[in-house]
Amino acid sequence: MKFLRLANLAAIALLASGCSIMPNNSFFIPPTEKNDSPWVRVVDNTEQTSIYQTLNGKRIGGLIRSSEWVLQNTQDRGMPKISGEKYDIDYYETPLMPGLETAIVNVYVESKYSCLITASFIPEKGKKYQFQLESDTLNYQCRVQASEIVRDSHGQWKREPLQNVRYSAKEGNGWHPMHSGR
């Protein structure tokens, strides 16, 4: 009985994580880049993150990666790097279509704990954004840091908190409790 329950939990975790070995997954297909395209960088946890945009009332997009078996699948497309930040972890850069409702869906699964936070915003032409899911497994909490990448007065790139973003978590962009699968 206990084995059956564990097998069921494992199957649910695979389905919830968007595991690419399962059929019927949809994947995000980057739009054609234009001179004024907005860009987004998703930092870390790319194997369980999805990007969706709403075009003419239809939600398009999906997972940004097709494999959880590869630990690093960085897609560096030339977005500006922030001075002092390390880029040795996995990240994904892509253009977006401007002016469309956009959702970055972040999922984190660790053992029996998980969290899901959706950050929604409308990207503006020519702007650059960064979204990063942070997890605190000691306190069983997570959060998403949504930023706009801008130049400071010295011409250096820096992150500023994104103002017009809506989070699915009740706590907004603060720490959100993880959920237990048991």
Image: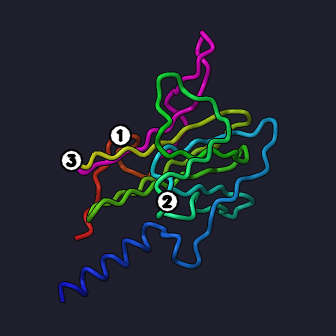
- The answer to which of 64 and 145 lies nearer the viewer is 64
Q: Amino acid at mark 3?
A: Leu
Q: CA distance from mark 3 to mark 2?
A: 26 Å
Q: CA distance from mark 2 to mark 1?
A: 30 Å
Segment colored magenta: 138-167
Query: Looking at the image, is mark 2 or mark 1 nearer the viewer?
Result: 2
Q: Position of residue 173 (x, y in %)?
A: 40, 40
Read off the residue under disc 3: 138
Above or below 147: residue 76: below
Residue 166: in magenta span = yes
Looking at the image, residue 143 sits to the left or right of residue 50; the answer is: left
Q: Marks 3 and 1: CB-CB under 8 Å?
A: no
Query: Residue at point 46% right, 42% down?
Result: 89
**Label 2 or label 1, whichever comes before in sequence order:** 2
Instruction: Please tell me whether the stretch drawn in magenta is mainly helix, strand or loop.
Output: strand
Above or below 37: residue 113: below
- How many marks on residues? 3
Q: Position of residue 108 (x, y in %)?
A: 38, 56
Q: Residues within 10 Å of mark 2 (few under 14, many from 20)?
A: few
Q: CA distance from mark 3 to mark 1?
A: 16 Å
Q: Position of residue 171 (x, y in %)?
A: 35, 45
**Label 3 or label 2, whichever comes before in sequence order:** 2
Read off the residue under disc 1: 174
Marking on residue 40: none
Read off the residue under disc 2: 70
